[in-house]
Amino acid sequence: MTTIDQVKTKFRSIHFNTIAYRLEELLRQAGESELTHLQLADLMVEQELRGRQEKRVSYNLKRAAFPVVKRLEEFDFAFQTTVSKKQVLRLLDFTFVDNRENVVFIGPPGVGKTHLAIAVAVKAVEAGYRVFCSSALELVEALDLAEMRGQLKQKINALLKFDILFVDELGYLPVNKKSACNLFQLINALYEYRSLLLTTNKNFTEWADFFSEDAVAVPIVDRIIHHSHIFMMGGESYRLTKKIGSDRSG
Ligand code: ADP
Ligand code: MG
């Protein structure tokens, strides 16, 4: 006589964990809804596939290392009028990732660049893409450290495993020549191979200032903008406006 626990153990041994976990429920549902054997088989495999998909997404969300999770649904397009909701939604078919194109949000502090970039990146993870998020500062530090250890190539290769590399706040702090060269090697490796999602407060014409010299800034900019969707954002700082608003009302 086969027991339900024995069957569950067998499912677990071949890593069908969702089916193992839900077996009683699935069998009850099959009885109550008078499912055919084929329908039950289909239900089981569907549950297993969905379970795996959810697990993959939650693993990739952790791996993406977002500083905070921001949602597109929380973004107020009535406040930020220099980009339209339609323009942003257009990114969500993720052809930009499939075509290895870049997305760049440019604008002054507080206008929602990081919010939108995180929101798009979260949707990408939910759609099954692998994302890695880093502040420009942390990224430059990590590349410099790897270079010092003679492991720059390995570090870059590790970053190339992600479909989207999300670099937040490039341009806030200047980088020295050595760091700019390391960054260039990364950008060069990503070029036409992976997508870069970038936020920056600097216009491309100002990039030479923080890359210490034109000789490195120009080829970096060149590769980033060649295949890219550029969102020029302006308007008031959301942070500042809300702060002033709450100070007045409080
Ligand atoms: P930036 O990266 O351009 O400096 P952020 O994206 O960090 O700005 O935005 C600053 C704060 O204001 C964040 O908490 C963000 O969620 C919020 N914020 C900015 N713009 C909007 C908006 N249009 N709707 C809702 N929240 C916003
Ligand atoms: Mg930001």
Image: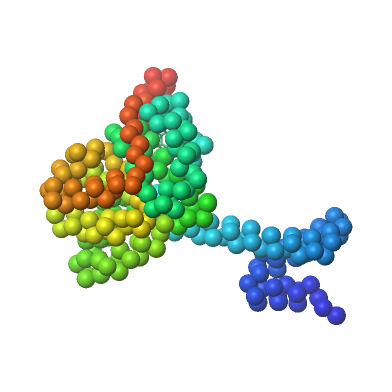
| Residue at image coords 69%, 73% | 11
Which quadrant of the view contains residue 181? bottom left
Q: Nearer the viewer, residue 33 or 193?
A: 193
Which image quadrant: the C terminus?
top left
- Measured as percent of width and height from the top left, residue 142 is found at 27, 60
- Measured as percent of width and height from the top left, residue 132 is found at 39, 55
Vertical placement of residue 23 versus 113, above or below: below
Task: Judge from the rendering whether residue 240 lies leftward or rightward of residue 17; answer left or right.
Answer: left
| Residue at image coords 47%, 33% | 86
Task: Judge from the rendering whether residue 156 lies leftward or rightward of residue 209; answer left or right.
Answer: right
- Measured as percent of width and height from the top left, residue 211 is found at 17, 48
Which image quadrant: the N terminus?
bottom right
Vertical placement of residue 168 versus 235, above or below: below
* Residue farthest along the bottom direction in this orientation: 1
- Measured as percent of width and height from the top left, residue 99 is found at 41, 52
Quarter of the picture for ligand 1? top left
Q: Is residue 64 visible?
A: no
Q: Nearer the viewer, residue 198 or 175?
A: 198
Q: Is residue 1 visible?
A: yes
Q: How many marks?
A: 0
Task: Judge from the rendering whether residue 25 lies leftward or rightward of residue 117; answer left or right.
Answer: right
Vertical placement of residue 22 versus 80, above or below: below
Task: Judge from the rendering whether residue 55 lies leftward or rightward of residue 94; answer left or right.
Answer: right
| Residue at image coords 71%, 76% | 10
| Residue at image coords 33%, 66% | 157
* Residue farthest along the top direction in this orientation: 248
Q: Nearer the viewer, residue 67 or 11?
A: 11
Looking at the image, what colour scheme do you see?
rainbow
